[in-house]
Image (tube, rainbow, N blue to C red):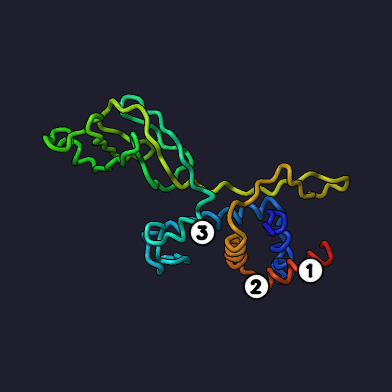
Amino acid sequence: MAFSIDYLYQFSLKLIRKNQSGSINGTEFAMFWNDQQAAYTSDLLGRFQPRSNGKTGNNTGLILNETIVTKLAAFTKPVTLTIASGVVDKPLDLIYRLALRINDKDVSFINHGQIASVKGSVIDAPSVANNKYYAVEYEDYYSFLPTTVTSASLDYIAYPENVVWGYITDANGQQVYNSGTSVQSKWDDITNQEITKRMLQNMGVSLKDKDFENFGSKTIITGD
């Protein structure tokens, strides 16, 4: 069963009330959940800070663990970049570059101090004829050598889209879940549980590993 955003909200709401921690509406839930989704994504990709600086995930990072690449598959995108005068903007939702190719050949990334030496190289100068392509990365764009290239293929990890608990208002002014205006999580259910668990723990709500299972069983039996 794929967990809908409403399922995750109702589960969280039940535990919050059970712990006498007040209550939250659907909009607040989505805000707190998205905050932990961003933190979880950062943990998967790998942080530079040591665990003592508040990192709660593993110390592996994307490039050290192919399993993480699979977990992030829902957010992996291919795109063709149109290059003008050797420059192209990065996709707005890019969080991690996986591969960059021109004419099915890998683009070599160089640092800013290497630009002059690469341009003047006798052996490995930028060349379309020899399939020698280089790129320099800036904050929001790539600069290519040779500047005559017009397109490149980019594979990248995109920022997970923020979830939204959509609703309509009933005759009593109460918010009622509306799947049509909601944005669902694209994570697998195990990850949805982990993010929800982090969110609740961050709010000071205690829960056990069996809580999700028990809540799901009760929902199936009673429809509540």
Q: Is residue 203 something that shows in the picture?
A: no
Drawn side of residue 102 relative to residue 170, left or right: left
- Compare marks 3 and 1 and give the one earlier in the sequence: 3
Q: Residue at x 60, y 66 (%)?
A: 197
Q: Name the disc covering residue 218, or none.
A: 1
Question: Label 1 sits on what residue type?
Answer: Lys
Closer to the camera in the image, 50 or 161: 161
In this view, the residue farthest toward the right is: 171
Q: Quadrant of the C terminus?
A: bottom right
In this view, the residue farthest toward the left is: 122
Q: Residue at x 46, y 40 (%)?
A: 78
**x, y (%) of residue 19?**
70, 71
* Above/below status of 25 relative to 94: below
- In three-dimensional space, the C-alpha distance between marks 3 and 1, rounded to whole angstroms, equals 28 Å
**x, y (%) of residue 8?**
68, 59
Closer to the camera in the image, 164 or 118: 118
Drawn side of residue 217 relative to residue 39, left or right: right
Q: Give the crowd class for mark 1: few <14, some 14-19, many >=20 residues within 10 Å.
A: few
* Above/below status of 159 relative to 16: above
- Compare marks 1 and 2 and give the one earlier in the sequence: 2
Task: Give the residue number, with chain letter if any, for mark 2.
Answer: 207
